[in-house]
């Protein structure tokens, strides 16, 4: 016979009813423990969201799989922009595929001053880290078709000269101008304003590459004149006086004897 329980029951409560209540309480505790264990297991792989129940003041946590939440967040995020592809740049020494007027006779009209060509040479070699030997080979190939090659001494002498027309007889001046003109045409760049002014100043013949312009050009047996001041295009902008008379300005901007 089982031992008697010493638990006192409230009045009007049978022992069988008490056992039923005890069993219900035990079942509730077991369910609570099971839910807690399930929550701890789901917590590593799920996200809880609130879900309304019949009770307006209560919410029940509903597990949502983490994978679904991540997929939703990824779909909502804007797609990353693709980086722009860099424009392919050609060989900075390749001027092939372009032919200029009078190129075969080495008499292409030049429409840059010597200062402009010097500036282009220095900028181009610095920008593309070009060696002097490679540059000289490129301009010789572009401008000279009789086997001649521009020498380093010629390049250095031209770069040391000063003034809009300083070094105009140097072959580096001509060869470099032809090279850069071919690059301009090949890349589709338009003429600059300075280029258009040079065309209007020097006409169809271009810059004179035969006569050297300097103080020695204005020496005379009766005396020596002062060299006229030149503007950025190589035009004389002041008349010069000697004991032979007045030096006027010619049609192309250079002094002519009166």
Image (cartoon, rainbow, N blue to C red):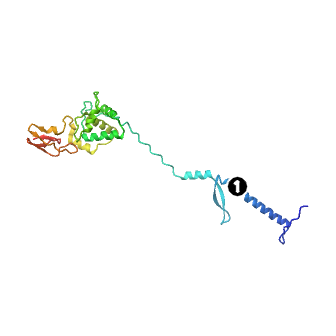
Mark 1, Cα crowd under 10 Å, few <14 / some 14-19 / many 20+, is few
Q: Residue furthest top?
A: 147
Q: What's the residue at 77%, 60% (across, down)?
A: 27
Residue 112 visible in rendering: no
Locate residue 137: give its quadrant: top left
The residue wearing badge 1 is: 38
Locate residue 220: give its quadrant: top left
Q: Quadrant of the N terminus?
A: bottom right
Note whether 135 is above or below 20 in the view shown: above
Left or right of 86 in this view: 39: right
Residue 125, percent across and down? Answer: 33, 38
Residue nearest the viewer, comparing 188 with 110: 110
How many numbered circles are shown?
Answer: 1
Residue 246, percent across and down? Answer: 10, 43
Note whether 235 is above or below 57 in the view shown: above
Left or right of 9 in this view: 51: left
Q: What's the residue at 26%, 33% (across, down)?
A: 154
Q: Residue furthest bottom?
A: 11
Residue nearest the viewer, comparing 130 with 55: 130
Note whether 66 is above or below 173 in the view shown: below
Q: Quadrant of the C terminus?
A: top left
Locate residue 139: give its quadrant: top left
Residue 20 visible in rendering: yes
Tag 1's secondary structure?
A: helix
Residue 5, percent across and down? Answer: 86, 65
Residue nearest the viewer, comparing 37 with 214: 214
Q: What's the residue at 59%, 51% (across, down)?
A: 70
Residue 172, percent across and down? Answer: 27, 34
């Amino acid at each position: 016979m089982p031992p008697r329980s010493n638990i006192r029951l409230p009045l009007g409560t049978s022992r069988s009813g008490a056992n039923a209540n005890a069993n219900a309480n035990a079942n509730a505790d077991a369910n609570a423990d099971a839910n807690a264990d399930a929550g701890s297991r789901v917590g590593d792989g799920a996200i809880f969201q609130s879900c309304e129940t019949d009770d307006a003041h209560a919410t029940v946590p509903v597990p949502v799989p983490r994978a679904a939440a991540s997929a939703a967040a990824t779909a909502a995020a804007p797609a990353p922009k693709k980086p722009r592809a860099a424009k392919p740049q050609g060989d900075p020494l390749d001027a092939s595929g372009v032919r200029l007027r009078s190129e075969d006779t080495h008499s292409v009209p030049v429409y840059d001053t010597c200062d402009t060509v010097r500036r282009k040479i220095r900028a181009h070699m610095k920008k593309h880290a070009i060696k002097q030997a490679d540059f000289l080979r490129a301009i010789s190939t572009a401008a000279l078709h009789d086997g001649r090659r521009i020498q380093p001494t010629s390049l250095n002498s031209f770069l040391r000269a000063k003034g809009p027309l300083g070094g105009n007889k140097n072959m580096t001046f001509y060869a470099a101008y032809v090279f850069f003109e071919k690059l301009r045409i090949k890349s589709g760049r338009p003429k600059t304003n300075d280029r258009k002014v040079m065309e209007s100043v020097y006409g169809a013949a271009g810059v004179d590459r035969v006569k050297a312009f300097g103080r020695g050009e204005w020496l005379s047996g009766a005396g020596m004149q002062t060299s006229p001041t030149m503007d950025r295009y190589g035009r004389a902008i002041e008349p010069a006086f000697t004991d032979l008379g007045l030096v006027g300005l010619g049609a192309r901007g250079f002094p002519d004897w009166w």
